[in-house]
Image (cartoon, rainbow, N blue to C red):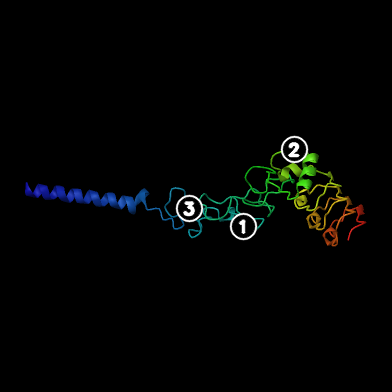
Amino acid sequence: MKNLAKILRLGLMLLSAMFIISCVGGGGGKTCIDRDKDGYGQNCPLGPDCNDNDPNNWISCATCADSDQDDYYVNCDTYETILGPDCNNINPLIHPNAPESACNGVDDDCDTNIDEGETVYFPDANLESAIRDEISKPTGDIYNSDLCTLSWLNGASRGISNITGLEYCTNLQTLSLAYNRISDISALAGLTNLQHLDLHNNQIRNISALAGLTNLQNLGLRYNQ
């Protein structure tokens, strides 16, 4: 009986050793070696890894790409350690977290929303009133998307002294601000679509902001300082 018990114990020990070997070493149960933790590696279920030190390179190392060099990538494997995915890998200005341009018809920040609104603040209540009249929005926040179709604005003789906020009216072609108290016109510098601009009878000394408005056809500046 003692010999039988020894034989049984030896048999159990042998079976245990065979089970351990099958789990970590031999046959189809070999240990998955995946140094970069991307699911691919030596003996791993998903397959081999062509670069096991880079979680963004695996079976086909050339697939993880940043063609527009904006540091946002496409076609990388699911182990995300880099910025992405990029919804446009051709234009470097389009990527997650990019500033959203209100009037270009493009999803700049890759959040699936096109021309989403950003609140625009007009410090001058008289200018805000003129804007509201033109966009037919008497109350509520004014968003930059509300200003996309604004091509004409008459703000003459309204007591306007501060034109901050007009920089968002990028599609303006005709603008009249005559007979006001305006001295700083820097907000006009980026309004490159302007063709007709009337600023006469104000308090303007410096007109350098108009240097880049190459589409201007008519400019009124008489009776300024």
The image quadrant where one finds the C terminus is bottom right
Instruction: Out of 21 and 199, give the one closest to the viewer.
Output: 199
- The residue under label 1 is which amino acid type? Asp
C-alpha span from label 2 to label 3: 55 Å
* Left or right placement of residue 107 versus residue 166 in this view: left
Q: What residue is pinned by disc 3?
A: 38
Percent x, y of residue 206: 84, 62
Give the numbered dot on residue 138: 2
C-alpha span from label 3 to label 1: 20 Å
Instruction: Out of 86 and 21, give the one closest to the viewer.
Output: 86
Mark closer to the observer (3, 1): 1
Q: Is any part of residue 125 visible from this angle?
A: yes
Instruction: Out of 25 and 192, give the one closest to the viewer.
Output: 192
Asked whether disc 2 touches disc 1, contact meaning CB atoms under 8 Å apart, the reply is no
Give the numbered dot on residue 71: 1
- The residue under label 2 is which amino acid type? Pro
Check disc 3 and report its element: helix, strand or loop: loop
* Left or right placement of residue 64 versus residue 37 in this view: right
C-alpha span from label 2 to label 1: 43 Å
- The residue under label 3 is which amino acid type? Asp
Percent x, y of residue 14: 22, 51
- Which residue is located at x 46 percent, y 57 percent? 36
